[in-house]
Amino acid sequence: MQPIDFPDLQVIESDLHKVWKEYSNTIQNEKPHLFNIIANRVPKLNNETEIIIEIFSQSQESEIKKEKENILNYLKNKLQNSQLKLITSIPKNNEPKITEAITVVDKLKAMKLQNPAFAKMCSEFNLELI
C-alpha cells in the first residue's frame, strides 16, 4: 500500500488505536509472529507525528523493523497523515513476563530473570538456546 497525496490531518489517539487493530487483523494469517507483537501492544502518540510502540526485546524490535515500511504506509493512508513516524522503545526497567514472551529465546530470558535458581541450573548444565 503506497501513501497517497492528501492534506495531513491531525491524528487522534483513539483513531490510531482503531487503525492499529485493523492493521494487526490484516496480517494475522500471513505474519502470525508480527501479529502477536502488534496485537499485544498499544501505540502512543508522542507528538503530532511520532507513534511510539513499547516492546521488550530485540527480537520484537527486529520483527517490527522488517515490516516498518508496510506498517507506516498503512497508518499514513488510513489516518491521512504522510508525516507519521514509527518509533520502537525498549524500556530499561522492563522485565518481560513469561506470558508476554513470543519466541523461545524471549521465554527463556524471561524465566531466567524471574527465577535465579533456574538461571543457575541453565548455566551449570550448559542449557543455552543460542
Image (cartoon, grey):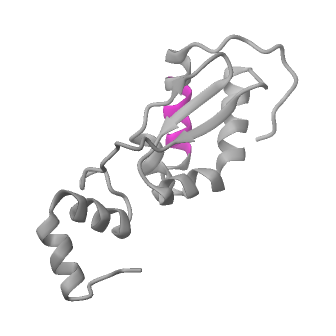
Task: State the image quarter where residue 129 is shown.
Answer: bottom left
Residue 107 image point, x, y percent: 29, 63
Does 39 appear in magenta? Answer: no
Instruction: Look at the picture and state if 90 lies above or below 46.
Output: below
Residue 31 image point, x, y percent: 53, 57
Given residues 71 and 28, the one toward you in this image is: 71
Q: In which quarter of the image is the N terminus?
A: top right
Given residues 97 and 38, the one toward you in this image is: 97
Instruction: Look at the picture and state if 129 lies above or below 93.
Output: below
Residue 127 image point, x, y percent: 26, 84
Given residues 33 and 49, the one toward you in this image is: 49
> Which contiguous range is marked in magenta?
18-26
Q: Which residue is drawn at 74% across and 21% down?
A: 81
Task: State the image quarter where residue 69 is shown.
Answer: top right
Q: Residue at x 30, y 48 (%)?
A: 95
Q: Residue at x 81, y 39 (%)?
A: 2
Q: Quadrant of the C terminus?
A: bottom left
